[in-house]
Amino acid sequence: NIEDLRKHYELKEMDLPSEKDWEKAIERAGYILGITQSELLNASNVAKFSDNVRAELSNYQEACTNLQTTLDKLWTTRNDLDKSAKRLSTAEAAKSFITDILQTDGTKLIERLASWESKTTPAPTDAAMGTSIKKAPDVNKALSEAQWSIIEEAENLKGSQKEKAEQLTKDLKDALEEDEYVTALAPKINSIQSQALTLIRAAIKETQQQEPGQGEPGETAKKPGGTGPITKDDQYVTIKEQEEKDLSPAEFQNVFNEILDLMNQENARIELSWRIYKKSTDRSDK
């Protein structure tokens, strides 16, 4: 009953943050997480604000952790990327921010949110860090689904495609190094991947149009083994010949990569005959 409650409990005033910390925390939560909050400082608003911040950060914690891990691996794989790049430092800051803020709640959360500073260099703006947090799931998806083998194949093209291949590498490097606030990575990777396929197709088409044994412009074509100019009587050996049917896109990608490797051999040429089809689901498809 009421008398029992009076004996065992006492009403205590909740410690509230300072007006300065309260206003700063609200401002930062808006920039980073898109959270809006009444500026009226009272216990109810403090509790509500703290719960909203924690819920929002919890939603993105796993994605931000995975993003930093993925970027670290990518930076290890591609040795042309700057280790102090904004995207990398911003992702690291975002992960640390989420971890630090989620260790607190209530007034302590507000005080930490107001005073939190990144230890990364360069330190990201709140807007940049917020974009990195919010877009982490999209960036993770784009990086995991990217056809890196196709992009790398295009980057290594020589001859008439070399200049475009070098520009492709530069565009990719710039997109990866700039933070998400400046460059949205998902559409950029899709664009670069399409460009890579275009360059590879152009290189294959040029190879098909050349006469067997034709070298670089200005060079005399040589027989396999370099024994002299090619004549009508020269014979060629088949490097590999096989037939594949009913391939899925993933299976075709494996065969395509193998073909590209074989085509890197000197004087290699290719004959193609192909058909793309699908199961009919409509009489109009027949």
Image (cartoon, grey):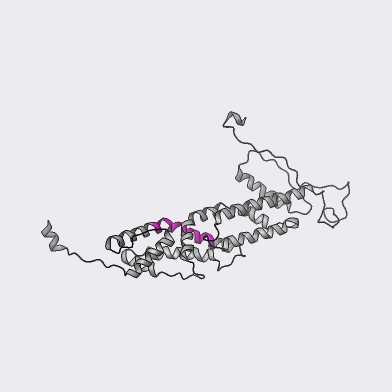
Residue shown at the point (67%, 47%) measured from the top left: 256
Q: Is residue 99 magenta?
A: no
Q: Which residues are magenta?
A: 56-71
| Location of the C terminus (image quadrant) | top right
Residue 18 is left or right of residue 192, and the answer is: left
Q: Position of residue 158 (x, y in %)?
A: 73, 57
Name which quarter of the figure residue 178 lies in: bottom right
Q: Which secondary structure dominates the residues rendered in magenta?
A: helix
Dividing the picture into quadrants, the one containing residue 143 is bottom right
Residue 43 seen in render: yes
Residue 156 seen in the figure: no
Q: Residue furthest left?
A: 3
Q: Nearer the viewer, residue 169 or 24?
A: 24
Q: In the image, is 173 to the left or to the right of 33?
A: right
Q: Is residue 60 magenta?
A: yes
Q: Residue furthest top?
A: 283
Q: In the image, residue 213 lies at what x, y percent?
A: 82, 51
Residue 54 position within the rendered picture, expressed as x and y whole percent measured from the top left: 37, 59
- Quarter of the image that includes the N terminus: bottom left
Q: Is residue 163 left or right of residue 14?
A: right
Query: From what the image shows, is residue 155 above or below residue 125?
Result: above
- Rendering coords of residue 193 (x, y %): 62, 52
Residue drawn at the location 37% of the way across and 65% of the way down: 25
Which residue is at a point 75% across and 46% down the rendered structure image? Answer: 270
Number of disc labels: 0
